[in-house]
Image (cartoon, helix red, strand yellow):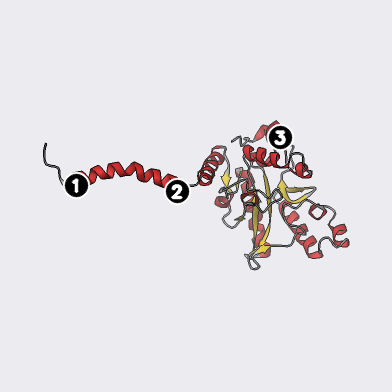
Amino acid sequence: MGFRTISHYRRQWKERLQPILLLSFFALLSPGTLLAQDWSEQMIKAGLVKVTDVAPGIMVDLMYSSKDNFMQEDVYGDFEEAYLTPHFAEKMARAQEILVKEKGERYCLIIYDAARPLSIQQKMWNLVKGTPDQKYVAPPTNGGGRHNYGVAVDLSIYDRVLGAPVDMGSPVDFFGEAAHIGIEEELVNKGIITPEARENRRYFHRLMARVGLYPIRKEWWHMQERNSIRHVRTTYTLLDF
């Protein structure tokens, strides 16, 4: 048997340790981290873009990535990025640009939900099915809803100085009269929302309308385009993962 140098044994140990070190590294990554990475890859594969890549000034605080939502469940885990179709993300960028121009750097848009995988739509449906909240979640059947295609966004305006969203009369994800649109004057007269909240909401909706986005009747924060769900399902890619 020939003489083996110290470098030979070092190389041998390195080869033996490498797989162990790799396994240790992946063990440190939580299942949620791996899932979040996979979701991002799937979003991009479906043709979506990360909103903050298009508009870095926009904040993202996904409400379903914590238990602070109407279901009181964290259904997103470590996934904390907002993805939308490219044209929808451009609308967000334009709205952010207008907001800063008109109100200054103190304010920015803050996104609470954007593209959502169909598997999460199913999870949300399972949580609310048979409860009064069922009407607020689109069933995952028949192709899902707009969030499942990256053409819907839940958002508000954020005040960087105060470190909080501006008063819109109710929090996002609040299901009650205070969240309904088109009756703001009545809500003020009833003392349900303040005159300031009414004006903030009116400005927000005018801002969104300027980029072609509109709220739905019972959710002042939910923005979508004026097209049919059939158009959405036949035009965009379902996030079926």
Q: Is residue 209 above or below residue 122?
A: below
Q: Amino acid at mark 3?
A: His
**Counting other residues with Cα less than 10 Å from the Cα at mark 2, is it few (<14), some (14-19), or many (20 or more)?**
few
Choose between 64 and 23: the one closer to the eye: 23
Label located before the other in sequence (3 or 2): 2
Kindly indicate whether the residue at mark 2 contacts the one at mark 3 (C-beta within 8 angstroms): no
Q: Say which residue label 3 marks.
A: 231
Q: CA distance from mark 3 to mark 1?
A: 66 Å
**Counting other residues with Cα less than 10 Å from the Cα at mark 3, is it few (<14), some (14-19), or many (20 or more)?**
few
Choose between 124 and 95: the one closer to the eye: 124
**What SS does tag 3 mark?**
helix
At horizontal 74% and vertical 42% (from top left) the residue drawn is 226
Label located before the other in sequence (1 or 2): 1
Q: Could you tell me which quadrant the N terminus lies in?
A: top left
Q: Position of residue 144 (x, y in %)?
A: 69, 36
Residue 57 figure quarter:
bottom right
Q: Position of residue 68 (x, y in %)?
A: 67, 54
Label located before the other in sequence (3 or 1): 1
Q: Position of residue 71 (x, y in %)?
A: 70, 48
Q: Is residue 166 above or below residue 138?
A: below
Q: Amino acid at mark 1?
A: Ser
Q: Say which residue label 2 marks.
A: 28
**Counting other residues with Cα less than 10 Å from the Cα at mark 1, is it few (<14), some (14-19), or many (20 or more)?**
few
Q: Say which residue label 1 marks.
A: 7
